[in-house]
């Protein structure tokens, strides 16, 4: 039996009548003024970024559209071909410059025997020529884009087999295309080595399985997946154009890197690794190629300030360690490198450039960390720190340190959270009302909806969109059916999106405006069969336990044994005190029931909640009290559907 793919749980948009109030708006006078001020304050552009991004171009794909097997578009290389001339008033001029460089795509030669495919996804695929085949670092996000990238490589450089695969870290855009470039059969035959950093699988499960639903829904806003590229729409993601919409896959690593300085020889090529955990990802490493004098900085140094806590949600990262690892990279690799590449954006060339790029990033994260802690220890709250902390000119004037992806505002709050948590020590924030109730009370205290909307209109006319959004947000949560408040809030968000230098701030503001105007149309891109199949059973069972509904299970106690025949695994499942606890390798001496079958049927039972009769017909065997298994399955929440963000 084949498990049904768990790819898209969509929600259709409600029908909205044509209404001018719900149409996108042009840039306001306040936004036009803000863009002019931003343009005047930008550092001088010495054209190095544009030159580095174009250097080594070999070719690109003739057909710009990459499709899935069913014919739907997964990726369009020409989605930003329309960008010409100066920035329109609806796009921050700094972001416009950035995207004109970032939108380039194709196969590029970096150094002898090293190339990159850039612009085929949000990330880059690095290609190293081995003695007999290709060693690939970070095979993009999806099967389809990875396959298209490898097809271009073979077409332009000569067809060779893939002999090595390296995952630099535990984010999907750096491993999801694995099955597009190699196969499980070749791995089992020993033809392909897959190398990853320590704890790669555990952290992949944590992010994509345990918290995958919430992160994916929030990621729809971060990456603007419902927006169309254009002057009033999506403008990339700050470190790439966007995220491809194909099939995310995962092949389990065959080798693990444990410490900095570890070396591996793959297909005749010696590689050296630097471990950088708890920086951009909990499990991450950099790669140095001695023969080519080339250092891959994974994602701890790109063309933008990164996120210490990404808006889609993740574990808070360690800004201090991030800076220290960059310092280590300067000492270990800068003097040995003539080129530096990363898993996003474009390379830099020359030993001086390598050192200044790494040290510039190092100082930016260190300044961000140290000054946040300094202000934190003076008693400033996260919001107060975010309002006043700015990068010094020496750092802000380095284009690669600007906030196209991460921002000082969000990152300072993340540093605060890592040390002190979410609570800012103000007792009024210790136990506030939830947003819906708070909105109702604030609107009432201000004199009702008419007065709130009037004050919001006054703020918008003055260009104070931060205040108008705050007011209108309360109004929408107090009364989500108030059409005027929804339309005005969408307009307010839209202008803030136009002004944002950060691509992902823009995406979130414009996605919010879209939801308010058109209704929620977003989908959750959840776990694929392939990803679930690659995750260890204990991690999957831990994820299942997070869906146990205490109102349904009540005080019932269950003792169930799982015998996962095709993996020769067994698990002891205990339910009590409204908690599900699983222990691998153990079994209840006197279980309520014993369930035996292949793991795919367990996944169908626990994730898809297929009827037991259907699963039994497919080969699942239940011995003992069948009602105990039914009770466990019934108490599991269904896989999460998309949830509202801009309204209750």
Image: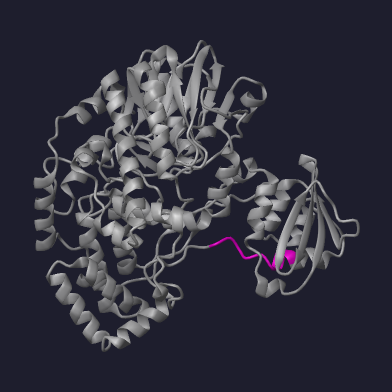
Please state the horizontal and vertical placement of residue 394, each as a whole percent of the image.
20, 38
Query: How many numbered marks appear?
Result: 0
**Left or right: 390 as drawn, with respect to 63:** left
When asked about the image quadrant of residue 184, the answer is top right
Residue 633 shown in magenta: yes
Please state the horizontal and vertical placement of residue 62, each as a whole percent of the image.
32, 28
Q: Nearer the viewer, residue 344 or 363?
A: 363
Span highlighted in magenta in the image = 632-640
**Left or right: 153 as drawn, with respect to 594:** left
Q: Nearer the viewer, residue 410 or 71?
A: 410
Please state the horizontal and vertical placement of residue 218, each as a whole percent of the image.
42, 57
Residue 223 shown in magenta: no
Q: Nearer the viewer, residue 406 or 166?
A: 406
Magenta: main secondary structure equals loop
When asked about the image quadrant of residue 114, the answer is top left
User: Up-down: is 387 above or below 347?
Assistant: below
**Left or right: 553 as drawn, with respect to 175:** right
């Amino acid at each position: 039996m084949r498990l049904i793919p768990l790819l898209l749980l969509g929600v259709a948009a409600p029908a909205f009548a044509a209404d001018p109030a719900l149409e996108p708006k042009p840039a306001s006078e306040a936004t036009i003024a803000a863009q002019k001020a931003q343009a005047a304050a930008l550092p001088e552009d010495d054209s190095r970024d544009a030159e580095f991004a174009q250097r080594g171009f070999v070719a690109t794909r003739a057909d710009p559209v990459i499709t899935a097997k069913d014919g739907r578009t997964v990726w369009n290389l020409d989605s930003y071909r329309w960008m010409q001339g100066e920035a329109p008033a609806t796009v921050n001029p700094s972001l416009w410059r950035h995207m004109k460089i970032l939108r380039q795509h194709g196969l590029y030669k970096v150094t002898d025997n090293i190339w990159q495919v850039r612009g085929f996804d949000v990330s880059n695929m690095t290609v190293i020529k081995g003695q007999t085949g290709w060693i690939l670092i970070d095979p993009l996000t999806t099967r389809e884009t990875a396959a298209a990238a490898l097809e271009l490589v073979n077409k332009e450089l000569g067809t060779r087999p893939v002999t090595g695969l390296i995952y630099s870290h535990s984010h999907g855009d750096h491993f999801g295309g694995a099955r597009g470039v190699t196969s499980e059969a070749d791995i089992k035959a020993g033809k392909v080595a897959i190398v990853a950093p320590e704890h790669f699988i555990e952290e992949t499960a944590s992010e994509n399985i345990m918290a995958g639903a919430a992160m994916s829904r929030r990621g729809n806003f971060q990456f603007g997946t419902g927006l169309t590229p254009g002057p009033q729409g999506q403008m990339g993601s700050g470190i790439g154009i966007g995220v491809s919409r194909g099939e995310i896959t995962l092949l389990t690593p065959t080798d693990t890197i444990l410490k900095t300085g570890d070396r591996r020889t793959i297909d005749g090529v010696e590689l050296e690794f630097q471990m950088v955990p708890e920086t951009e990802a909990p499990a991450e490493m950099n790669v140095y190629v001695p023969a080519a004098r080339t250092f891959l900085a994974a994602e701890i140094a790109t063309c933008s300030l990164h996120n210490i806590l990404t808006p889609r949600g993740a574990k808070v990262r360690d800004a201090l360690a991030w800076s220290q690892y960059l310092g280590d990279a300067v000492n270990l690799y800068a003097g040995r490198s003539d080129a530096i590449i990363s898993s996003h954006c474009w390379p830099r060339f020359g030993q001086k450039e390598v050192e200044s790029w790494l040290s510039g990033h190092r100082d930016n994260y260190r300044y961000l960390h140290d000054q946040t802690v300094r202000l934190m220890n003076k008693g400033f709250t996260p919001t107060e720190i975010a309002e006043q902390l700015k990068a010094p000119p020496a750092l802000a004037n380095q284009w690669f340190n600007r906030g196209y992806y991460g921002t000082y505002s969000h990152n300072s709050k993340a540093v605060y959270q890592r040390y002190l948590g979410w609570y800012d020590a103000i007792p009024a924030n210790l136990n506030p009302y939830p947003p819906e109730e708070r909105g109702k009370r604030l609107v009432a205290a201000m004199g009702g909806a008419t007065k709130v909307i009037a004050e919001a209109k006054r703020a918008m006319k003055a260009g104070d969109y931060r205040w108008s959004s705050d007011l209108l947000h309360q109004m929408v949560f107090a009364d989500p059916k108030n059409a005027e408040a929804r339309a005005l809030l969408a307009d307010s968000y839209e202008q803030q999106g136009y002004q944002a230098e950060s691509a992902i701030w823009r995406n979130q503001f414009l996605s919010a405006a879209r939801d308010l105007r058109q209704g929620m149309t977003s989908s959750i891109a959840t776990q694929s069969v392939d990803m679930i199949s690659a995750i260890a059973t204990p991690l999957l069972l831990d994820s299942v336990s997070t869906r146990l509904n205490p109102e349904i299970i009540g005080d019932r106690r269950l003792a169930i044994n799982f015998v996962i025949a095709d993996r020769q695994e067994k698990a002891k499942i205990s339910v009590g005190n409204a908690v599900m606890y699983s222990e691998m390798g153990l079994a209840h001496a006197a279980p309520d029931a014993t369930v035996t079958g292949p793991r795919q049927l367990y996944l169908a039972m626990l994730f898809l909640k297929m009827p037991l009769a259907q699963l039994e017909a497919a080969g699942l065997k239940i011995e003992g009290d069948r009602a105990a298994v039914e009770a466990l399955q019934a108490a599991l929440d269904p896989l999460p559907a998309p949830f509202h963000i801009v309204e209750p």
